[in-house]
């Protein structure tokens, strides 16, 4: 069951929210954990047991690390981190899917959100080891950190201290539920209306082999992939943040309109903010601090970006995407002294981001290079009737996608907030949200859920 | 701002709760049966999501709106159906290799059968009108599938190329606009060639009295999309009074219960008009005085085709590959029939429908 399904929106959510509101304050965490277990149970009882075991192992080891002598703390921490990484690799890396076979799971099945909750668990262990936080003795609270259903699929991936504060400062009231539902519906619209259509465009553009695909179709495919990826990730992340807010927990968003950034570095800082921050905090900074050599620091920087790319795709294409992104950021920093680049950053940032996304899209490096070759006219066909047909069919979707990936609307709302127009917008908001919900419901009415997922984390 | 959020919360939660209540307590909700494996692996979750969609209040209206939106924004593809200008077309993803198991089965059948075997693979409406579809949607055409199938069938099997017959007549009303299946006229066009191969002279078109039973039939593709602007179809009955009649028409359902059927029963809706509700086995006895018997192994395409055959055979046994559940020898003794006709849709072949009767 995903967030973008009729079962979740019209059955699970009202029941879960209703039960949560009724339950006394001291039992709210337990209620939320039970609801999260039910949600995870929809992935299958085997998955639920796996996630509970995962929680138990990390919880126990963290307590153990906290209680033992500093000199030997690193051993159980390393063992637990190895365990977490092994679980992640066992599910996501096709060549190492022994756990998949051991649990006798159907093909393609893996616990949703495993990539995120593995990072959360590793970050928690490191923070406990370093003494930044105390190991939490409350198993309910810790389990919520790993498997709270509003966050499990796509975050927001926050550190444990931020999560604990949010848990303590729970604000459950009608206004918060309204704000949460607004954010949830926006995320739902991003996923169901935009991402799904862009996925179809991407599939159509890349349906043939690269030898017979036109350059225009290849570019169209890459552009649609990038936007589809953005709206899928940010849509699910917004849904998670919105649901969390409905239950009284405020977390910041994961994306800040990265696509039309004026610099590659700015793109990187706005793209999946919490994940990039996690890699910087737990890998880049500790490794960089171990060396004074600028060359080694640069290698670390590019290397960690490669790791982040691998985390996304579990493929060599992902590694290249990350590594090249890191190199692009460093190169840009060096060349920023040229005024021409400073004032026209957007004109090189967007093409570079699109070209790099080819590696993430295709996974296989040789396919990615074939696609790049096609994009520069290597197939001998610059444009064809199919591209014209796809552009005609998806023109509206692309225009809306471009607009929705900018902060133009948000800036307009902020500017007119205290004016008559602002008042009109605030009156229309509930109607707009209901309208968007109805549109999403009608698009999910056939199968009951939004099936297309360009990436699974 | 807080007031806006409170109103949003009230409006959205009221909306969601109302629909939730009707879905759960509206009286139509049936939780799908599940087994231990589905519970352990999460397979039940998809069933529940589909069940929610099926029991959702005003589901057809929601789907109509969804179809309208999808057709206007993006490609006109809704739930695996392409909305062309004047008809709905299914989009398949079959490969040429999908034809091989069926060919193997029919070859094995022919080897162990004493009579003559005939094979007609019937294209769907996409096969005939799919030229209007973007090329990427049809990596393998039904013509290619049919060629592959016929190539793999043994030389002992007499093949009827229905594709060529129907393609030549594509300007006529030979396929439903809202269904993958052919019309009675399309079935008649292929009947003429099939019956000649079977050793008979076809009844000429002008001898039939054609009655429009309904002009508001919405077929399987309409059910997939609920696209309101799709044109409904006409279902016709072809009647020819040559003095012979259908004496008896009985079917055996999946529970083994024998039931009487009435061909061309206008109280049945849709395609069930022709031979009644789908059953694994149907036997038709006529007053044709020639002791000729025919075994037809088919799918839904056979429904409006078989009535044309009743003027030529004293007995026709029909095994439905759609509804059969394995052992077909419990229904029929093959030695009683000197001719067997396979009449299956190419879409059904690709889905492996003949596995049901292995």
Image (cartoon, rainbow, N blue to C red):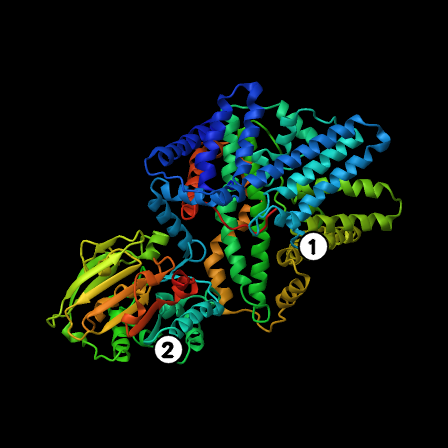
Total label count?
2
Q: Are marks 1 and 2 on the same chain?
A: no
Residue A42, given in percent of the width and then of the height, sits at 52, 39
Snapshot quadrant of residue A44: top right
The answer to whether one can see residue B2 in this image is no
Residue B139, given in percent of the width and then of the height, sits at 48, 68
- The tag on residue A67 is none
Snapshot quadrant of residue B56: top left
Snapshot quadrant of residue A328: bottom right
Q: Which residue is mark 1?
A: A321
Q: Which residue is mark 2?
A: B157
Mark 2 residue element = loop
Mark 1 residue element = helix
Q: Label 1 is found on which chain of the structure?
A: A
10 Å neighbourhood of mark 2: few (<14), some, or many (≥20)? some
Are dots 1 and 2 in contact, CB under 8 Å? Answer: no
Q: Is residue A357 left or right of residue A134?
A: left
Residue B48's place in the image compared with A246, above or below, is below
The answer to whether one can see residue A396 in this image is yes
Mark 1 or mark 2, whichever is nearer to me: 2
Residue at 70% over, 57% down: A316
Residue at 67% over, 45% down: A88
Q: Is residue A177 left or right of residue B62?
A: right
Q: Nearer the viewer, residue A319 or A381?
A: A319
Residue at 45% over, 39% down: A7
Residue A171's place in the image compared with B202, above or below, is above
Residue at 39% over, 71% down: B109
Q: Label 2 is found on which chain of the structure?
A: B
Residue B58's place in the image compared with B352, above or below, is above
Spatial CA span between label 1 and label 2: 56 Å
Outermost right residue: A292
């Amino acid at each position: 069951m995903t967030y973008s399904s009729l079962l979740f929106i019209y059955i699970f959510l009202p029941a879960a929210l209703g039960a949560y509101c009724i339950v006394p304050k001291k039992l709210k965490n337990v209620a939320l954990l039970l609801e999260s277990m039910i949600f995870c149970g929809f992935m299958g009882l085997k998955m639920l047991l796996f996630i509970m075991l995962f929680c138990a192992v990390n919880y126990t080891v963290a307590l153990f690390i906290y209680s033992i002598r500093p000199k030997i703390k690193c051993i159980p921490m390393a063992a637990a981190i190895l365990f977490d990484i092994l679980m992640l690799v066992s599910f996501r890396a096709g060549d190492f899917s022994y756990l998949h076979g051991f649990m006798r799971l159907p093909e393609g099945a893996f616990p949703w959100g495993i990539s995120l909750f593995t990072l959360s668990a590793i970050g928690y262990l490191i923070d406990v080891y370093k003494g930044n936080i105390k190991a939490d003795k409350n198993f309910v609270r810790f389990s919520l950190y790993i498997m709270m259903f509003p966050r499990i699929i796509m975050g927001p991936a926050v550190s444990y201290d931020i999560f604990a504060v949010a848990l303590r400062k729970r604000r459950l009231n009608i206004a918060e539920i309204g704000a949460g539902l607004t954010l949830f519906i926006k995320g739902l619209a991003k996923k169901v209306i935009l991402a799904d259509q862009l996925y179809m465009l991407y599939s159509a553009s890349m349906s043939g082999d690269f030898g017979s695909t036109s350059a225009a179709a290849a570019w169209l495919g890459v552009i649609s992939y990038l936007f589809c990826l953005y709206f899928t990730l940010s849509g699910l992340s917004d849904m998670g943040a919105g649901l969390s807010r409905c239950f009284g927990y405020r977390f910041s968003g994961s994306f800040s309109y990265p696509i039309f950034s004026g610099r590659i570095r700015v793109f990187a800082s706005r793209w999946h903010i919490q994940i990039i921050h996690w890699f910087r905090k737990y890998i880049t900074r500790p490794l960089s601090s171990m060396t004074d050599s600028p060359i080694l620091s640069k290698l670390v920087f590019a290397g960690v970006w490669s790791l982040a790319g691998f985390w996304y795709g579990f493929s060599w294409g992902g590694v290249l995407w990350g590594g090249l992104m890191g190199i692009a950021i460093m190169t840009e920093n060096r060349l920023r002294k040229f005024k021409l680049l400073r004032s026209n950053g957007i004109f090189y940032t967007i093409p570079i981001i699109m070209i790099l996304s080819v590696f993430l899209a295709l996974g296989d490096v040789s396919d990615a290079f074939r696609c790049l070759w096609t994009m520069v006219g290597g197939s001998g066909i610059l444009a064809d009737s199919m591209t014209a047909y796809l552009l005609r069919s998806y023109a509206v979707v692309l225009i809306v996608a471009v607009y929705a990936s900018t902060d133009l609307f948000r800036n307009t709302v902020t500017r007119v907030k205290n004016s008559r127009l602002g008042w009109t917008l605030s009156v229309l908001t509930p109607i707009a949200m209901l309208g968007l919900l109805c549109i999403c419901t009608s698009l999910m009415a056939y199968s009951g859920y939004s099936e297309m997922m360009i990436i699974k984390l | 701002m807080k007031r806006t959020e409170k109103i949003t919360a009230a409006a959205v939660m009221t909306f969601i709760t109302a629909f939730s209540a009707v879905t759960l307590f509206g009286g139509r909700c049936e939780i799908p049966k599940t087994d231990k494996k589905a519970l352990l692996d999460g397979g039940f979750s998809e069933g529940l999501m589909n069940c929610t969609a099926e029991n959702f209040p005003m589901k057809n209206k929601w789907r109509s709106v969804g179809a309208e939106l999808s057709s206007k924004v993006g490609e006109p593809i809704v739930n695996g159906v392409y909305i062309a200008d004047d008809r709905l077309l299914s989009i398949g993803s079959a490969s040429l290799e999908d034809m091989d198991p069926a060919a193997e089965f029919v070859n094995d059948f022919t080897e162990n059968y004493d009579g003559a075997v005939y094979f007609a693979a019937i294209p769907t409406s996409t096969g005939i009108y799919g030229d209007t579809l973007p090329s990427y949607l049809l990596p393998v055409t039904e013509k290619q599938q049919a060629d592959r199938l016929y190539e793999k069938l043994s030389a002992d099997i007499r093949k009827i190329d229905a594709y060529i017959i129907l393609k030549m007549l594509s300007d006529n009303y030979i396929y439903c606009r809202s269904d993958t299946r052919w019309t009675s006229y399309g079935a008649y066009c292929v009947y003429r060639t099939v019956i000649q191969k079977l050793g008979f002279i076809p009844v000429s078109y002008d001898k039939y009295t054609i009655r429009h039973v309904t002009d508001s039939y919405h077929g399987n593709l309409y059910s997939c999309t609920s696209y309101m602007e799709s044109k409904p179809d006409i279902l016709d009955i072809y009647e020819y009074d040559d003095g012979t009649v259908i004496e008896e028409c009985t079917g055996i359902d999946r529970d083994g219960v024998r039931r009487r059927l009435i061909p061309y029963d206008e109280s049945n809706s849709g395609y069930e008009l022709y031979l009644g509700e789908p059953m694994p086995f149907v036997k038709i006895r006529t007053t044709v005085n020639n002791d000729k018997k025919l075994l037809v192994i088919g799918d839904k395409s056979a429904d409006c085709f078989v009535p044309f055959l009743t003027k030529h055979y004293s007995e026709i046994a029909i095994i439905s590959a759609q509804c059969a559940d394995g052992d077909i020898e419990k229904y029929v003794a093959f030695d009683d029939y000197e001719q067997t006709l396979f009449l299956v849709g190419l879409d059904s072949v690709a889905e492996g429908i003949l596995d049901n009767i292995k």
